[in-house]
Every structure is written in C-alpha cells, then in structure tokens.
Image (cartoon, rainbow, N blue to C red):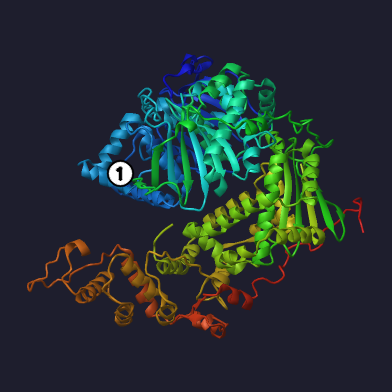
Amino acid sequence: MVANNPFNKYKPADWKTNFKSKLTVESSLPYKEYTGLIDKSSNDQHQYRLMRLPNNLTVLCVQDVEAKEAAASLSVNVGSNANPTELLAFEGALDRLAQFFISPLFNADCIDRELKAVDSEHKGYLQSDSWRTYQLITGTTNPTHPFSRFSTGNTETLKDAAEELGLDLREELIKFYQKYYSADVMRLVVIGNHSLDVLSEWVTSKFSAIKSKGNTKPIADGHPIGKAELGKVIHYKTVRKMYELKMQFALPELKSIHGAKPFAYINALLGHKEAGSIYSVLRKNGWATTISGYSSSTFYDGFSTYEISVTATLKGLENYEDIVSVIFGYINMLVKNGPQEWYYQELALVSKARFDFKDKEDAERYALRLSGEGRNQYVSPQHILSHNYISSGYNAVLISKCLSYLNPNNYRLFIGAQEHKSVECELEEKYYGILHHIADLPSHMTSEVKCSPSVAKMLHLPGRNIYLPESLSVTKPATPTDTPALEPVLLRKNDKFEVWFKEDDQFFTPHGRIGLAISSESVDNSPVNYLLSALLCKLVSAELHEQLFSASMANSYFYMSQGGGLINVGVAGFSSGLPNLLKTALQKLKTFKVDVQQFSIYLAEIERMVQSKRQDSPLSQLYRQLDNVNVAPAFDQDMLEKALKYITLNELQRHIELIFSKGYVKMLVSGNYNHNPAYVTQRINRFIRQYRQKLQELTVDEFESSVQSLISLKQEKLKSIDDEFGELWAYIKSDKYNFDKLNEDVKHLKRLNKDDLLAFWDKYMSEDTAQGYTRLDMQMWSTKIWQPTAEEFEMYPSTVIALYGCLRSAGHTGLTIADVQSFVSSADASSSIESLLAELSELYLSKQVSPVSSEATGVTNTDTADVKEPRIVFESSSKIATALQMAISSAKEAPIFATLSKTNFANIDMKQSPEGIWLIDDYKRFQHTQPLHGVSVPSCKLVPLISESAPMDN
C-alpha cells in the first residue's frame, strides 16, 4: 500500500532559465524563446523553436523543409486533444483551431452530433476484451477516486444523467471549459515546411488570446488502489476464448524519476524470455505464452500503477497460483542480487542508439506525440525530444525502491476467461456488463507467498547480450547522389532461389533488413495446410523468441509469418548483427522438431484464434468475406473450424518437410452497427449515381489541385529503410518487379484531364453507361435485426427490402414486406415526400390491432371524428423517408442489372432479385465460375533484369 511518495523530494524542471524575450518578425508580437540546447537525434533534420507565449502557452514550432503535409496538435492536459492534420491552407486551419480554444460556440446541434459520436464509439468497444478489462480495472478501484469513473462516456452518462439531475448539458460543457481550459497547462506543437519565423508569427498571433487561468489540472487526493482494494482476486468473463492474468501493484507518482528509467530496467528483466526468466519457466511448464510489464509512470498525476500481464494456457489458468509464485520468486531473486549496473548500461546503450538513428515520423503522429508528452513537468526543455530514450543515469537506490513496491502485500489479481469452474461470476459491471467475482486472496498468495525451491533454482539473471551492435558506423557512397537508386540489384538467380540487394543510398543509418519468402503450393492450398502453416509460424516464433530475445533487446528482431502462398521469414535492426541473427534463425528452421507440449499449447491458441473470429467486429468480418470471394485460396469460418480436427503432430512435421524441400526462396537484403445493410447499400447506389454530377461540376483548378495532391503523395520521400524495404519487397513477392510503378503513375497523372476522369467513370463506374457493369456488394447483417430470406430477396426489389428493414429497425412491425411492396408499386412518384409519408402512416395505422399510443409512435394519438389531418407517424428527416424516396424512385425505373448482367448463375442455384442482382450464398461456387483469379497481368517486367556484373548461378 502506498502511504506517501518518497520521490516528492525531486523538483520539477526549470522552465524559466534560458527563455529570452523576442518579437515576431512581421508584426512585432511578444513571446519568449528558449535559447538553450535541445537534444536532437543525429538523424533529425528538423529545425525546432521552443516558445512561451504571453499567456504562458508552451509552443514547439517544427520546420520540416521536406514536408508535404502540415500538422498541429494542442494538448489541453485535461483529457482531450485537438489535432487537425494534413492542413493544406495551414494558416487558416491554425486560426480555426485557435478559435476553438478562445471562443468556442458549443452549438446545440454540434453537441448532439458529438454526443452521438461518443455513444457510437462506446458501443464499438462493448465486445472488445481490452476495453472491457480496462473498465473492470478502473471500476473496481476506490469509488471516491476519479480514476474509478467511466472514462469514455455514452448517452446514458452524459445526456440522460444531465437530464435526471436537471442540468443543461451545454451549460455544463461551458462550465468545464471555463474551469479547466487554461493556456498554462496546454502544449501546442505545429509542424510545417514554412520557416520558424513564419510559424512563430502564426502561433503568436492566433493562440496568445487563449486565457491564462493558472494550473487548472485536477489532482485527486489519495491512491485509487488502497487497502480496501489490495489483496483481492477478481475473476471475470471474457468475450473471446482466452486466458489472461494481470497483477496490478499500487505505486506512488513516478513522474519525477522518469529520467532515471528504473522501470525500463525492471520491465526488461520481468519480460525477459531466455533461460532463467519467468517466461522460460512458464513456457516449459506449459502455463503461458507471453508475459509483459507496464508502468503508468508518466500518465497519471498523483499516483502510478504497475501491471504484469500473462497470456496463459488452460493449464496455466488451472495453476494460476503457481504462476504468481514464479513471478514473485523472480522478483525476490532480483532483490537478493541487487541492481546490476552492467545490464542497465546495456539497455541505455541500445536506447540511445535508437534515438540517435530514429526514423522520421509522419507529421500527424509526431505532432500528436510531442504535444501529449507535455504532461510531465519534470522533463526539461533540453530533453523534450529525447526524454523517452536517454537516461539521466544509473541509480541503484531508485531501482531498489521501485522493486520494493512489487511485493505480495501490494497487489491485486485479475483472472480472465470465458468460463470459470471454481467461481460463479455473479456481479455485473455497469457499463459493459462484465460478469465478475471479487474475493480475498488467500494468505499463501499474499504475505506468505513462496516459490518452490526447485523452481527458484531455475530463475537467474540474464547473461551479457552478445547481440549488441558491434558498430554503428554508416557507410556513405564516395559520390553522393540526389537521386536514390530505384531498383535493387539481382545478385543471383537459379531454379531454387533468387537474391536481391539494395544498398542504403538515402537514409544513412546503421539499420538493415533481410527478408526471405519461401514459396510453396503446400503453404495454404487447403484449409488444413493453411492452419498447419499458421501453427508452424507460431511454434518457431515462440522458440526463437526465447532463444533470440537478447537480439530484440539490442533492437534487432526476427519475424515469421504466412500469407499469399508464402512463408515469410526476416530479420531487422542494426545491420552489423543481422547476418548472424538470420543464420541462427535459419539453422533452427532447418532442424526444427516439434515439441509435444508446445504443439498442444499453440494448437489450442490456433483453435481460439479461429473460433474467436466469430466475435470480430462486423466490419472485420465483412472484409474477410470480401477476401473470401476475391482472393484464392481463401477459407471461410466453417471450413477452418472443420479443418482443426485434422491438425496432428505428425501432419505438422510432414508439412514442414514438404515446404522446405520443395519451396522456392526469394530474398531481399536492404540497408459495429446494427443498421440495415440493404439500406446502406441503397445509399451507396444513390451516392454513385449522384457523384458524376459532382465530378462534372469540378472546376479545372479543383481537378488539377486534386491531381497534384495525388502526385505529391506518390512523390513523397520514403522515411526509413523499413518503408523502402516494404515497397521493394511487395514488388518482388508479387512477381511483377515493377519498381518504377510510382514514377509511371506520375507520368500518367500529369497527362490526365477532367474529360479523362468523366470517360473513366462512364466506362467503368456508372451503372447506366458501363458496358457489362459488374459490382460486388458485401453485406454484414446483425443477428439482432430482421434479415430477408433468399426467397424474399428473389421476390422483392432491394429498395423495398431496405425500406422494410428500416421500418422494422424503428420498431414499426405492423406491416408485412408484401404491404410495403404493394404501397411502393402503387405510390405516385410525383407526390411530395411529406405526402407519401402521410399515406404510409395511414397504411401503418390501419394495420394496427389496437390504437397506437404516443409512446409507441412518438406522436399524440388524437383519433377522433373531428380529426381530418393525416396522422403522421414517420418524420421526413428519418431513414424511413430516405428509404421510401429511393424505393419509389427505383420502382419507376426499368431494372438495369438484369439487362447488364451477361452471366446466368441460376444453374448453380443462385437467387436473382427483380433488378437482376445475384445473391451469392455459396461464394466457392461463385468463385469457381468467375475469371477472378487467373494469372495476374504484370504491369512491367516479367523477368528480373540481371546486371552484367552480377554473378549468375545456373
């Protein structure tokens, strides 16, 4: 338990010295500029100016002469960011951003729109295990502490709560703004290709009017995890099939010691994966597949927490007490051995190298990150760019003190799984409905926790890191060039492999990447082989991650994945150690033998992965279905689930031998909603029909501006070796070798005019003019709403189905789909939408068995003999109105798809709608009848060009 903060003796950074009064060049506006040193990466070409405006707003101006986009991010330090990006008219955009903080309007319609966005965002998180777990963690802390409050919000907690308390939501927002939005606690970051003088002029003139109200950051008293919350075990049910353990420790605020990086040291040791580590012991016992630590050292004011997370197996879940004892056994070993300066210095060396040679970030991400990092008042102006990388120095006392908080009397335990055999999860969390159970930890898991002597002997410190970079020197060409080589060089090619090489001639960092793609028909030509390949990648990755973890600590990484008929293997990081790293990995691949216990563990993980896809968001499932239709080979959920029973250890070993004996190797070396889907589809149809008019109305300047934007995007310089490697690797793996594709695209774009665009639209995109118009629509239907049967799809137009779905979704169930079809067919298309809605309302009310109440319809029932006005149930601004317009409009037009479709799918039992749309209820049959997956047509060279000087192996 945290009684007080021993780190309060450290003082905040000095933000007064070295700030000199200056005036802007053009308007002579006052500000203060930091004239001291700002630590920059040696690879950083930006120019920086750190400023403080007269209202105490801290501003960092960043000049990037190569920037194709500009960005601004203002952190208010009370839980909100404003970060418009890709600002073309940057000065005007800055002015609009500033006015939001100077004189916000808080218009009622904007508040309502944002409220709906917040509620929609919350609903999107309802089935996310990570969001659910976070809410359970915060919701079970001290209820009087702000940390326990619901952080994301929804309609119930914002609008409904305000109404229940008799409060005006707009007025409460204004009060919040007036109380907390102070320039003193804000940080603004502006990035653009304008000079620092111009950027300074803009920010000073536009942001100095934000009011200074002093330090308005709310800091709560006490710790959210107090005596009442510690010593608890909380079992909770997850959405996906998974097993998760989290140990949460209560810590004092750690911002003041962030520079010494004590928890970087602790994280590295607790997350270590080689022999002697927690992970190694857990893996050997078949209890877990991952372990990690996380400190909230810079995020919260007034307190911190530390979490150890374990992705467990079923066996591990059943032995969770043993997992906890191993973790505490390792912590006790660290305490007994004391802090190790040599290990700290290894970490510091790699972290500094990462900073010195860090890749350039895109403007949006960079601005957002730098503004958000302004929450730590202990970071000095000199270290605003480097503080997350560069350590202030080894401090054994701080490390020991931080380790002392990780003790059995200062934690609580969370255990997540779909099912819990030992407890009943009888409690329900308020906002996510998380079922859980809270109990006291038994004494042998708190003050009396012990690690068995046999396990304790297995736990020890890691050895020296043999993968630390031997050299960070950078080789530059004798004759520099402003035009980097476009293509890699093909060094060798025969019937077994091809090797490509691309020298770093533009980034000049000590980084490199080596990638291998093993091509074999056996990789994923059947559901069983697809799963076997996935299992192989997991098994090899797990074993190599344990063996090569030190390499990852030295910023060099091994990866292995499958996809597109390929097994992808690669290494990335500091170039000097990559050949040995790859050699070790390939030797393991060549001699890999499957361990029985590990096979069972990762097969269970593959099973959970396959089965959990049914809990994916509707959008994710929709994209997957789209791939199933357009990509070969592709396997749906049912096929993969059926294939699981054929995955055996012997089959896996045979699969491995087959891939590596007959594979061809390529190598490159280089420095949710519940909306009616039918309605959404009709809205898309409407958009496509109307969009040509928007294209027609484009002025020449607007068209040329759009073309130039696309050209600029394609001409944007690559930011890192990883970017270059990814681009070249995609060309090689695709067998197209079209390395100059972007340049070719730009040549064609420069020749385009508006007439070309309209001709393209008419030839390919317009259903009215395109010859043989074909379009594939994917719809994901929620099980909570009405869905048409195949017979209804065949009988009724899709616009009628969309309208009927909207009626059902709004709770209007009195009409049948036949009623809706009859009404649409007989409606007068020349009538106004208000008149048509009135007629539909009359039809709906006539079908009701009992009078319709005001509660059900949203209108007062005045059904008397004196009433002559039509009773309106449906509003003209509703989705029902839009769907009605589309249905009636479509009913008066001849169906076009029936005449455009050149293929009859009736012989494979597909249903066709009255418009001629085919329903694909068996995508495999459809796939086999379409020329969607023939030999790809390369846009450039089919065969790699080999330079005369390159050796050729026959």
The single residue placed furthest to the bottom in the displayed view is: 907
In the image, 273 versus 45, the foreground residue is: 273
Q: Residue at x 66, y 24 (%)?
A: 344
The single residue placed furthest to the front in the displayed view is: 453
The image quadrant that residue 429 belongs to is: top left
Q: Is residue 784 above or below residue 337?
A: below
Q: Residue at x 30, y 63 (%)?
A: 878
The image quadrant that residue 274 belongs to is: top right
Report if residue 699 is visible in the image: no
Q: Amino acid at mark 1?
A: Leu
Q: Residue at x 59, y 54 (%)?
A: 604
Question: On the image, numbered disc 1 is attached to which residue?
Answer: 158
Quarter in which the N terminus is drawn:
top left
Residue 438 screen position, x and y as percent: 39, 40
Residue 681 screen position, x and y as percent: 44, 68
Residue 352 screen position, x and y as percent: 67, 27
Quarter in which the C terminus is drawn:
bottom right
Residue 487 screen position, x and y as percent: 78, 51
Q: In this rendering, would 409 be left or right of 348?
A: left
In the image, 432 versus 107, the foreground residue is: 432
Question: For mark 1, does the 10 Å Cα neighbourhood hold few (<14), some (14 to 19), or many (20 or more) residues?
Answer: some
Q: Is residue 80 above or below residue 865?
A: above
